[in-house]
Amino acid sequence: MTKLNLTALLLLALLGFSFCAGTENPVSEDVWITLFESESPDGWQVGENAEIIWVEEDYIRIDGPRAYLYYAGWVENANFTNFEFKTQVLTKPKANSGVHFHTEYRETGWPDVGLVSAVFL
């Protein structure tokens, strides 16, 4: 990566996306399920600027303008309730990244529903 202006805001950030199923979750109780398998973006949907998102060395990388990656995989049909979420996030100076919860896919623009956990440097 040569750019330091990482202004990409990442929905469900880097390596280690997983959540813990709660008591109302039919997948399983108290089991961590990985949402990103470290090799490909399978199960994820990209909005605008898809060309700046790629998988490299088991990480989701973003370098460029705003871009969003939405989980659309098989776990709970991407509709989560009563869950715990953990991730590992690496940012560089001037980065703007975060994780949005309970949002909806948008081809362009900022998500206008849901909650965000922001990561800034």
Image: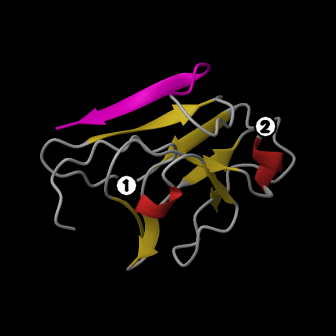
Q: Is 42 part of what is drawn in magenta?
A: no
The residue tagged 2 is 23
Q: Amino acid at mark 2?
A: Thr
Q: Which residue is mark 1?
A: 88
Q: Residue at x 48, y 51 (%)?
A: 49
Residue name at image x 70 percent, y 31 percent: 82
**Magenta stretch, residue numbers:** 110-121
Colouring rule applied to residues? secondary structure
In this view, 25 is above or below 61? above
Q: Earlier in the sequence, mark 1 or mark 2?
A: 2
Q: Report the amino acid beneath label 1.
A: Gln
47 lies above or below 51: above
Would you call the spot at circle 1 few (<14 residues within 10 Å), some (14-19), or many (20 or more)? few
Label 1's element? loop
Q: Quadrant of residue 104?
A: top right
Which quarter of the image is occupied by the N terminus?
bottom left
Q: Residues within 10 Å of mark 2 (few under 14, many from 20)?
A: few
Observer-nearest of 101 and 87 = 101
The vertical placement of 18 against 82, above or below, is below
